Amino acid sequence: MNELAPDSYVTDDGRTIGPAVLEMKNITLRFGGVTAIKDISFDIREGEIRAIIGPNGAGKSSMLNVINGFYHPQEGEIWFRGARRPSMKPYEVARQGIARTFQNIALFKGMSTLDNIMTGRNTMMRAGLFSQALWWGKAEREEIHHREQVEKVIDFLEIQHIRKVPVGRLPYGLQKRVELGRALAAEPKLLLLDEPMAGMNVEEKEDMSRFILDVNDEFGTTIALIEHDMGVVMDISDRVVVMDYGKKIGDGTPDDVRANPDVIDAYLGVSHD
């Protein structure tokens, strides 16, 4: 029987949660005189589903943008896989193994599902521009390999029937699934999901929840997600960090967060005597 690594544990459903893969230490982000994130610290453990919640304007998407290198905090440190991360651009962060989806769908609407998901492999392509243009040698072998990996993602997400359809013609729920597929094609170690179920109906949310759980379970992918549907958050998350007006007001298991008076106040707009 294999022994668990230090700081690791097994969940009730048999998944192994490892030590912290990402640590956000005292992060502060300002835009001019506005503080979007104020002195927030939390970690994301390997193999877990970590939710980031809070009312509108709490700074949740700004936090994801800090994690993926789009924003650079004025204060604090980011540690990834045990090493302090220097200031990086998004493509450099992607090469480290961090991929994300966006609150507003960011797909190439005129391109097919297959071609959109193929763009998720861009950071892994090594062939030169000349050989790519001629499609021979290394470039040919490389594209065949990438195409095989993309087809596996398409099968996993059960979207074979739309593989050649331009995504601009797809319903909203399927577009969100294609965007998830593009992120998965990058084979991320850490997957960031920004409101993956926004605008979906009940059936679409159930499908997306199932895929998120399957990605975590079958691929072992660590997931951090922003989501407003509290039913979904409480059902699929291992731990939850709560933000309000740029500050952290709660952090713990779903049950811990659900019982936290500060979290209740932030969502219900009430105060305790």
Image: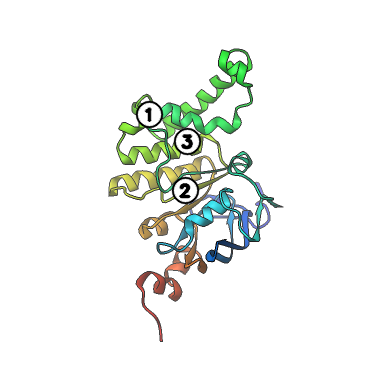
Q: Which mark is residue 134?
A: none
Name the kind of residue labelled 3 in the image.
Arg
Hey, which quadrant is residue 161 in on the image?
Answer: top left
Name the kind of residue labelled 2 in the image.
Leu
Asked if one can make out residue 135 in the rendered structure from this viewpoint, the answer is no
Q: Which mark is residue 182?
A: 3
**234 or 261, nearer to the observer:** 261
Looking at the image, residue 227 sits to the left or right of residue 45; the answer is left
Which sits earlier in the primary sequence, circle 2 or circle 3?
A: 3
Residue, x 35% and y 50% (percent of image)?
198
Which sits earlier in the primary sequence, circle 2 or circle 1?
A: 1
Q: In the orientation shown, which residue stands out farthest toward the front?
A: 32
Report the label total.
3
Image depth: mark 3 or mark 1 in front: 1
Q: Secondary structure at mark 2?
A: strand
Q: Position of residue 268 (x, y in %)?
A: 35, 72
Using a 10 Å C-alpha cutoff, classify the residue at mark 1 as few (fewer than 14 neighbours), some (14 to 19) or many (20 or more). Answer: few
Q: Which mark is residue 193?
A: 2
Residue, x 42% and y 36% (percent of image)?
107
Q: Please tell me whether residue 221 is drawn above or below residue 63 in the rendered image.
A: above
Which residue bears the numbered disc 1?
A: 110
Using a 10 Å C-alpha cutoff, classify the residue at mark 3 as few (fewer than 14 neighbours), some (14 to 19) or many (20 or more). Answer: many
State how far apart marks 2 and 1 are (Cα).
23 Å
State how far apart marks 3 and 1 are (Cα).
15 Å
Residue, x 54% and y 31% (percent of image)?
121
Q: Please tell me whether residue 247 is drawn above or below residue 202 in the rendered image.
A: below
Q: State yes or no: discs 2 and 3 in contact (Cβ < 8 Å).
A: no
**158 or 102, nearer to the observer:** 102
Name the kind of residue labelled 1 in the image.
Gly
Q: Secondary structure at mark 3?
A: helix
State how far apart marks 2 and 3 are (Cα).
12 Å
Q: Look at the image and tell me in which quarter the C terminus lies.
A: bottom left
